[in-house]
Image: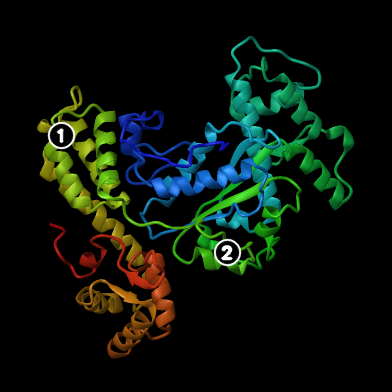
């Protein structure tokens, strides 16, 4: 029997993660905070969540291998939101069928993922944070014991408050006996002194990790590179395949090219069906996003506003976030007591969203321009040709076209067609299609921005 239902369906209803204050939503603007909880108004991605759930069921049955998930997509497509949703899924998972291990998502940056010590420290911190959350959730009066006093003091310092041990004392004591670290502070097992060999260090770590099903959640994974201090080829692969002899797997989220970056550090081979190429939302999911947001904040008379946002955002997650943020800001300014959309100027909200989107594109181009001075000129020449050819081209045709245009405009100086296509992928101008045979322009209106076209 499966641990979770693999057929995830989004029916558009509000969920606990959609409970967010207006002030917090407005302060986030278009960037979701990675807190380990699901992003408010997350919608769609049914196939992608299904991939994750299938991996969960395989891990639950004791199959530690073949659980790697790689998520690639252009900027603003919702990779971080999907990462948060995967973490949200793990919040409510029951223990694994084999071993009864608890699920532990561990967020990592690309630089930390290159280093075995950093990975291990992040896992230790995540375990301590989870235990601290267990302690904080206990409802009875505090209980102290000689064995757990030091742990309680450190956790209290870490969390900034007194901890309640009732109902969680044994967990705390077990962790104290095994030992671990958080924020560089050693907790527990001090009587044994520091390990005097690699095998002893590994034994202690196995003891501290044995009751957890650990999933490393690596953000911006396209930045992983071999050869940095303490890094080595195979870092992730060796963890994944069990050098620590505990169940460790990982999900990597990054820009196009992430899969190749992982191959460069010798990550174990991806499993068929677990490499996800994110694109825009479908129409139903985009509508769910808008409906959830307006419903969560009690916005009334919102039909005209909703239609305007959907039409402008072109089902692109980052655009939806920008226009929703601008709309809620206008409504809260003009009708804070009743949140009535009729009292807000829809045109003003849309113009504010337009400005935010143009600023976003400008920042992306500026970032690319630092490394590839001819990028903007070449892109502007290329976009109309791509449009004329249906917006999709096989890689070989695209390569030839980039070389032809680049030579004609002298905009490939200091680089080459391969480098331009790579920059265009990471900048969001181009992306491989789902079939892997063609390239297309994935982000709505980015091409139009390059050509100076009106968003309307």
Which residue is denoted by mark 2 in the rendering? Answer: 262
In the picture, the disc for residue 302 is 1
Quarter of the rendering occupied by the C terminus: bottom left
Q: For the point 72% across and 25% down, which residue is it?
A: 172
Indicate left or right for 352 with 219 as reference: left
Q: Position of residue 287 (x, y in %)?
A: 24, 42
Colour scheme employed for the rendering of this structure: rainbow
Q: Position of residue 335 (x, y in %)?
A: 16, 27
Quarter-of-image position of residue 331: top left
User: Residue 30 location in percent, x, y?
Assistant: 33, 46
Q: Is residue 307 left or right of residue 270?
A: left
Callout 1 touching callout 2 (CB < 8 Å): no
Q: How many marks?
A: 2
Q: Is residue 455 left or right of residue 181?
A: left
Locate residue 51, reporting x and y percent.
49, 49
Q: Residues within 10 Å of mark 1 (few under 14, many from 20)?
A: some
- The residue sitting at the top extreme is 141
| Residue lying at the far front of the rendered structure | 1
- Residue shown at 79% from the left, 38% from the top: 207
State how far apart marks 1 and 2 are (Cα).
45 Å
Closer-to-camera residue (438/224): 438
| Label annotation for residue 388 | none
Secondary structure, mark 2, is helix
Instruction: Please report whichever mark, 1 or 2, sits nearer to the chain's N-terminal start.
Output: 2
């Amino acid at each position: 029997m499966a641990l979770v239902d693999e057929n995830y369906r989004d029916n558009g209803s509000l969920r606990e993660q959609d409970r967010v204050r207006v002030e917090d939503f407005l302060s986030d603007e278009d960037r979701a905070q990675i807190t380990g909880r699901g992003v408010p108004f997350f919608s769609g991605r049914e196939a992608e969540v299904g991939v994750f759930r299938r991996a969960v069921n395989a891990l639950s049955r004791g199959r530690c291998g073949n659980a790697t998930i790689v998520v690639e997509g252009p900027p603003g497509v919702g990779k971080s939101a999907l990462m948060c949703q995967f973490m949200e899924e793990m919040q409510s998972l029951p223990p694994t069928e084999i071993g009864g291990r608890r699920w532990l998502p561990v967020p990592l940056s690309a630089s930390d993922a290159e280093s075995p010590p950093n990975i291990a420290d992040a896992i230790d911190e995540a375990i301590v944070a989870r235990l601290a959350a267990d302690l904080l959730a206990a409802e009875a009066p505090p209980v102290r014991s000689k064995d757990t006093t030091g742990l309680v003091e450190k956790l209290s310092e870490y969390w900034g408050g007194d901890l309640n041990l009732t109902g969680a004392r044994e967990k705390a004591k077990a962790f104290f006996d095994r030992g671990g670290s958080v924020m560089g502070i050693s907790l527990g097992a001090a009587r044994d002194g520091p390990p005097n060999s690699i095998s002893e260090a590994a034994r202690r770590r196995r003891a501290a990790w044995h009751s957890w099903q650990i999933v490393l959640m690596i953000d911006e994974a396209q930045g992983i590179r071999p050869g940095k201090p303490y890094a080595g080829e195979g870092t992730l692969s060796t963890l994944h395949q069990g050098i620590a002899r505990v169940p460790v797997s990982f999900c990597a989220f990054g820009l196009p090219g992430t899969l190749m970056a992982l191959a460069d550090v010798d990550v174990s081979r991806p499993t068929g069906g677990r490499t996800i190429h994110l694109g825009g939302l479908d129409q139903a999911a985009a509508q769910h996003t808008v409906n959830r947001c307006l419903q969560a904040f009690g916005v009334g008379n919102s039909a005209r506003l909703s239609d305007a946002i959907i039409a402008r955002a072109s089902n692109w997650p980052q655009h939806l976030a920008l226009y929703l943020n601008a709309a809620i800001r206008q409504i809260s300014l003009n009708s804070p007591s009743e949140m009535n959309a009729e009292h807000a100027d829809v045109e003003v909200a849309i113009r504010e969203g337009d400005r935010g989107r143009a600023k976003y594109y400008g920042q992306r181009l500026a970032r690319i321009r630092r490394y590839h001075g001819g990028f903007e000129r070449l892109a502007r020449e290329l976009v109309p040709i791509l449009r004329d050819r249906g917006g999709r081209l096989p890689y070989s045709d695209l390569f030839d076209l980039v070389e032809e245009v680049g030579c004609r405009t002298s905009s490939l100086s200091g680089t080459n067609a391969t480098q331009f296509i790579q920059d265009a992928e990471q900048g969001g101008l181009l992306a491989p299609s789902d079939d892997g045979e063609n390239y297309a322009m994935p982000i709505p209106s980015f091409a139009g921005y390059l050509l100076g076209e009106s968003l309307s």
